[in-house]
């Protein structure tokens, strides 16, 4: 199945597809092996920053190699893309999905630019999934000392169902990412804000297309379960992956002694990332926490 069909099946079955960001082959290997063990589809994401480190063509080649060798449902998303120029780069490279992030723009400008992106992408390849986003939730997958300035954390700032409906109707996006209490990154000394489950349900009812939850790292299992029941079909996890990578690398280096071969040091990072991915996929797929 192509990505649209995979997402449609998740929507119908009230489960969510895990979306995991990478910036190296170690992360991709750990995520793929964990998903394959559980036999669940996955989406790999590379943000604009990550695409500066991994060239888009390299990312496409790596994901395509896993998909074709193992006949496995693994897909690649150009995460948080902010310009038509960067959208064109990802389309040309062969990405399966594009997130155009106009969340810091006014509603009118976000609609205008997102519509332009959708029209361009569909003119090239109608199978590419295009996602739009409304509501600023911060921009860094990192450990946060405080809430990012301007992030929508109060109910009055969350995405409004009537504006979401207009956005989706006028842009014709395939998926929609709202601000519903979610936050990019993880707070260092406080729990994550609770998700507004009623708002998710209202937005889903208004837009009637698959919803995407960004900034999933750190949210509670109960919030995830309720969000999926209310209409979330894709969940993004990045900070948790980065944190597991760092801790795994530190453990591998600490225990490496005189070893200098990278592939003999990496296994701890692969193991740590894999634990996070498997726990999330079991939860998203409805088989426990």
Image: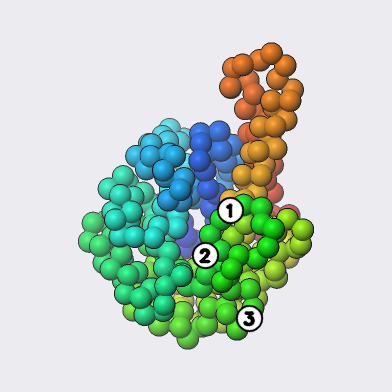
As drawn, the residue found furthest toward the top would be 258
Mark 1 burial class by Cα count in 10 Å: few <14, some 14-19, many 20+: many
Relative horizontal placement of residue 145, taking residue 101 as reference (left or right) = right
C-alpha gap between disc 2 and disc 3: 18 Å
| 146 shown above or below 27 | below
Q: Position of residue 246 (x, y in %)?
A: 65, 38
Mark 2 burial class by Cα count in 10 Å: few <14, some 14-19, many 20+: many
Is 95 in front, or is 32? 95
Identify the element where label 3 is drawn: helix
Which residue is depicted at the point 27% across and 48% down?
92
Q: Dot 1 corresponds to which residue?
A: 141
Q: Dot 3 corresponds to which residue?
A: 155
Q: Position of residue 27 (x, y in %)?
A: 56, 38
User: Sequence-wise, which precedes: disc 2 or disc 3?
Assistant: 3
Q: Dot 2 corresponds to which residue?
A: 212
Q: Quadrant of residue 154?
A: bottom right
Cβ–Cβ below 8 Å for labels 1 and 2?
no
User: Of tags 1 and 2, which is closer to the observer?
Assistant: 1
User: Of tags 2 and 3, which is closer to the observer?
Assistant: 3
User: Sequence-wise, which precedes: disc 1 or disc 2?
Assistant: 1
User: Sequence-wise, which precedes: disc 3 or disc 1?
Assistant: 1
Is 5 in front, or is 206? 206
C-alpha gap between disc 1 and disc 2: 16 Å
| 181 shown above or below 184 | below
Relative horizontal placement of residue 131, taking residue 145 as reference (left or right) = left
As drawn, the residue found furthest toward the left would be 123
């Amino acid at each position: 199945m192509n990505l649209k069909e995979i997402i449609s099946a998740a929507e119908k079955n009230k489960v969510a597809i895990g979306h995991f960001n990478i910036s190296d082959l170690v992360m991709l290997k750990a995520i793929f092996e964990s998903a394959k063990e559980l036999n669940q589809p996955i989406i790999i994401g590379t943000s604009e920053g990550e695409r500066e480190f991994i060239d888009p063509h390299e990312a496409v080649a790596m994901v395509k190699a896993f998909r074709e060798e193992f006949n496995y449902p693994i897909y690649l998303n150009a995460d948080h893309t902010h310009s038509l120029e960067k959208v064109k780069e990802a389309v040309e490279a062969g990405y399966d999905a594009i997130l155009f992030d106009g969340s810091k723009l006014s509603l009118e400008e976000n609609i205008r630019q997102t519509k332009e992106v959708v029209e361009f992408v569909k003119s090239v390849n109608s199978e590419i999934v295009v996602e739009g986003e409304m509501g600023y939730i911060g921009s860094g997958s990192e450990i946060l000392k405080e809430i990012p300035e301007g992030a929508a954390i109060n109910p009055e700032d969350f995405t409004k169902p009537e504006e979401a409906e207009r956005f989706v109707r006028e842009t014709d996006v395939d998926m929609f990412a709202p601000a519903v209490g979610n936050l990019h990154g993880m707070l260092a000394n406080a729990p994550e804000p609770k998700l507004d489950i009623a708002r998710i349900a209202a937005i889903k009812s208004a837009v009637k297309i698959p919803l995407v939850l960004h900034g999933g790292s750190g949210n509670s299992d109960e919030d995830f379960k309720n969000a999926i029941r209310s209409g979330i079909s894709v969940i993004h996890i990045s900070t948790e992956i980065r944190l597991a990578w760092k801790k795994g690398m530190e453990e591998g280096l600490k225990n490496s002694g005189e070893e200098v071969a990278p592939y003999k040091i990496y296994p701890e990072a692969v193991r740590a990332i894999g634990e996070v991915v498997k726990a999330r996929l079991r939860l998203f797929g409805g088989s426990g926490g």
